Amino acid sequence: MNTNLINKFLRDDSGATAIEYGLIAALVSVAAIAALTAMGGSLDAMFSAVSTALNGAVGGGGG
């Protein structure tokens, strides 16, 4: 009786799909964080350039 219960437990894969989706979501999150961290310096420089151009276009100072 115990071996039958153990075999049934070992063949049960009902939660495997949810775990796989969780792992995929975690990997995508890690990849996105790594990409944004790597591009952080260039994004900061780009936003600074846009900010400077907009401030020059409207003739205003910061504040």
Image (cartoon, rainbow, N blue to C red):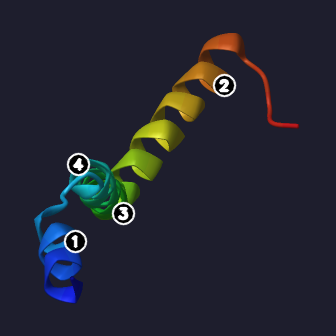
Q: Identify which residue is drawn at 33% across, 59% down.
A: 26
Helix, strand or loop at label 2? It is helix
The residue carrying pointer 3 sits among few (fewer than 14), some (14 to 19) or many (20 or more) residues within 10 Å by Cα, namely: few
Contact? badges 1 and 2 (CB < 8 Å): no
Which residue of the protein is positioned furthest toward the right in this rendering? 63
Label 2 sits on residue: 55
Q: What amino acid is found at the position of numbered circle 2 in the picture?
A: Asn
Q: What amino acid is found at the position of numbered circle 3 in the picture?
A: Thr
The quarter of the picture where residue 7 lies is bottom left
In x, y percent, where is residue 60?
78, 22
- 3D distance between C-alphas at marks 1 and 2: 66 Å
Q: Nearer the viewer, mark 4 or mark 3?
A: 4
The residue carrying pointer 2 sits among few (fewer than 14), some (14 to 19) or many (20 or more) residues within 10 Å by Cα, namely: few
Helix, strand or loop at label 4? It is helix
- 3D distance between C-alphas at marks 3 and 2: 27 Å
Q: Nearer the viewer, mark 3 or mark 2?
A: 3
- 3D distance between C-alphas at marks 4 and 3: 30 Å
- 3D distance between C-alphas at marks 1 and 4: 16 Å
Q: Earlier in the sequence, mark 1 or mark 4?
A: 1
Q: What amino acid is found at the position of numbered circle 1 in the picture?
A: Phe
In x, y percent, where is residue 14?
25, 51
Q: Earlier in the sequence, mark 4 or mark 3?
A: 4
